Image (cartoon, rainbow, N blue to C red):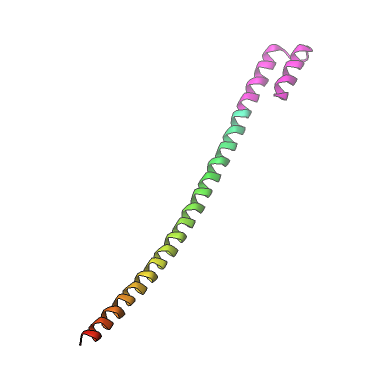
Amino acid sequence: MEERMRILKLLEDGKISAEEAAKLLEVLKEAEGSERAVIMKGIVKGIGEAMESVSTLMKEVSATVAEKVREKANEATEKIRKTSEAKKGKKK
């Protein structure tokens, strides 16, 4: 915004022509668009990196949960086996 005001002040003071002011304002507008593009690329890159981190974390959590479920299932299976064997032993 300051740059625009400077250009307009130069025009007002007669230091540049209206045509020169228009060209400067157009260049400024293009530069601001480029600046926005750079910012947007940075934002998109940051979002991508964050999503990759979340994905990696979810895979790690999933693997940990799966391992714990297997452990608990094995423990339950072993308890069932022991209980079944104990009942068979009492029936004899």
On the rendered structure, is 12 left or right of 91?
right
Where is residue 58 drawn, in percent x and y?
46, 56
Q: Position of residue 30 (x, y in %)?
A: 60, 26
Does residue 16 show up magenta in the picture?
yes
**Which residue is pictured at 39% across the width and 71% down the height?**
71
Instruction: Please tell me whether residue 15 belongs to the stretch shown in magenta.
Output: yes
User: As rendered, which of 59 and 76 lies closer to the eye?
Assistant: 76
Q: Main secondary structure of the magenta part?
A: helix
Task: Please determine whether, in this image, residue 37 is positioned above or below residue 54.
Answer: above
In the image, is residue 74 above or below residue 28?
below
Position in image of residue 50 (x %, y %): 53, 49
Which quadrant holds the N terminus? top right
Q: Residue at x 69, y 16 (%)?
A: 21
- Name the residue rendered at 63%, 28% in the picture: 32
Q: Could you say which quadrant of the image residue 80 lies in?
A: bottom left
Residue range of the region highlighted in magenta in the rendering: 1-30
Screen quadrant of the C terminus: bottom left
Q: Is residue 62 above or below residue 72?
A: above
| Residue 17 percent across, percent down from the top left | 72, 12
Frontmost residue, 92 versus 54: 92
Image height check: is 1 above or below 60? Answer: above
Asked whether, in this view, residue 64 is left or right of residue 6, the answer is left
